[in-house]
Amino acid sequence: MDQANRFELHYYFNEHGHEINALVRNKCEAELLAILIEAASLLDIEADLIAEAYREGGFRDIWKFLGKNANSLTVLALIAQIIIAAIPLFDSESSDLEKELNQLSIEEKKLQIEKLKKELRESQIDPETIKQAADTVGKSLKIIKRKSNFYSHLERYPKVTEIGISALNDDFHPISNELIVPRADFSKFVLSTNKLRSNEDDNAIIEIVSPVLKEGRFKWKGVYDEKIISFEMQDSAFRDAVLLENISFQHGTKITCVLVMHREIDEVGEIRITDYAVTTVIEKIDGDHTIETLQGKKYRHAKKLAESQGDLFNESANQ
């Protein structure tokens, strides 16, 4: 396989000329560089990037990879080329991003990347392994979000009719076919939502710092997993009992509860929790004294029943 040490992004225009809006170009460059850096990090490839003078023919941005291992740089360029041009398999209109992300287990992803690293050490690069590694690396939330940002910028700039992505050698010749993404496909990369599936801890322990003792949509404060959180008390039975002063609090009072954590990805692809909500208070704990709530008993009974039915179903399926 020929070696590549450069990466090219070619903007095709709907008119003659070699000019591009500087803000659009800079925004696209920032997202593309973030993708390259994240891919290199996931693949454990040491590579620095320097920008080179653009070439004519629409508008071509070129970056040169600097690193000690030529094979690794070639693989990085080829994987990045595939990643940026590959339309995501998930439905961009769906709020469930993890439908795509969970297709491969974490262990399977690690095995694929380790296989590629082994081939790099042995200087035996299988094109099929490169495709698999690109598919694996492309499932990174950071890369998915950065690609969404990249194509969102392009979608709002009608002058660009399509883009081309190439891996180039030291003579600026492509070592593989240029991958083209037409304008009609730009929207397929853009996420319609940043929301992820909510996480749920059905045995969360929260030390109450500040309960809400008056009506209104005020948030409680507590310590969960060694950090202060603000949360909405959605257990109406417990909330009403507090308002009626049937439940009191003292220093160190804790609750065992079902805690729902709403999540989304930010502009750089990091997962952040946007809100917490307690849907069921199972127990109230004051020192060594624990009181199970009525709704807590119902919740535990329903959970135990559901688990026993699941076990029965699995036993029947295995017979």
Image (cartoon, rainbow, N blue to C red):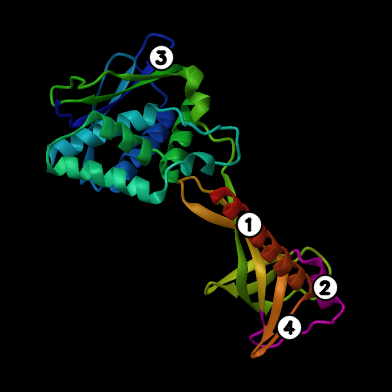
Q: Say which mark, if any, is on residue 13.
A: 3
Mark 3 or 4: in front is 4
Q: Residues within 10 Å of mark 4 (few under 14, many from 20)?
A: few
Q: Residue at x 57, y 48 (%)?
A: 317
Q: Which mark is residue 214?
A: 2
**Residue 22 among magenta residues:** no
Going from N to C along the chain, the mark reached first, 1 or 3, is 3
| Disc nearest the viewer among 3 and 2 | 2
For disc 4, the marked residue is 291
Inspect this view and state whether residue 278 appears: no
Q: Nearer the viewer, mark 1 or mark 2?
A: 1
Q: In this view, does 59 lie above or below 140?
A: above
Label ID, residue 312: 1
Q: What stretch is highlighted in magenta?
A: 234-254
Q: Which callout, 3 or 4, points at the residue further toward the start of the chain? A: 3
User: Three-letter amino acid code at disc 4?
Assistant: Ile
Front-most of 47 and 114? 114
Q: Point out the tag, 1 or 2, that comes first from the N-terminus.
A: 2
Percent from the top left, x then y, of residue 7?
25, 29
Classify mark 4: helix, strand or loop: strand
**Residue lying at the far bottom of the rendered structure:** 288
What amino acid is labelled 2 in the image?
Answer: Lys
In this image, 19 relative to 158: left or right? Answer: left
